[in-house]
Amino acid sequence: MCADRKEQQEQIDKYREVIPDAYLNIYDKAIKRTSRVAAVKAKCLDCTNWQRAEVRLCAVFSCPLWAYRPYQNVRESKKVSKRTTLKENLL
């Protein structure tokens, strides 16, 4: 393993220590590049200090991932496109 790769792995291992056990699988999938969905989930959870409810309540509308964030409440009676939802929140 080259020095850069070894440093990268050490950084990943160190960061994994602060991730709640419930989210390690998501983080691992993101790091291994096996799931783009997991990458978005991991980033959103990371941004909110691994608080799932905070991801749902996120108000950082300028974030490029905001419209794709996980754990959103889906209204069965009124399915709205993510683009429409984003426009409503910006108004």
Image (cartoon, grey):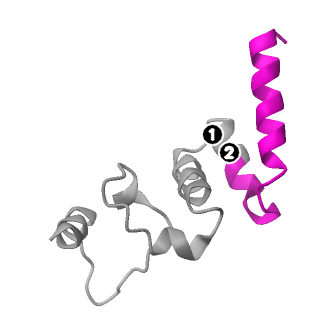
State the SS at label 2: helix
Residue 62 on image: x %, y %: 31, 54
Q: Position of residue 46 (x, y in %)?
A: 61, 54
Q: Which mark is residue 9?
A: none
- Position above or below: 35 against 12: below
Looking at the rendered image, the quarter that the N terminus falls into is top right
Q: Residue at x 62, y 36 (%)?
A: 33
Query: Percent from the top left, x then y, of residue 19?
Result: 76, 56
Left or right of residue 68, residue 40 in this image: right
Q: Secondary structure at mark 1?
A: loop
The residue to which callout 1 is attached is 34
Can residue 68 be seen here?
yes
- Magenta highlight range: 1-27
* Disc 2 residue type (three-letter): Lys
What is the CA distance from the residue labelled 1 to the residue labelled 2? 5 Å
Q: Is residue 70 above or below residue 56?
A: above
> Are discs 1 and 2 less than 8 Å apart at CB?
yes
What is the quadrant of residue 86 in the picture? bottom left
Q: Nearer the viewer, residue 33 or 90?
A: 90
Left or right placement of residue 32 versus residue 18 in this view? left
Residue 29 numbered mark, or none:
2
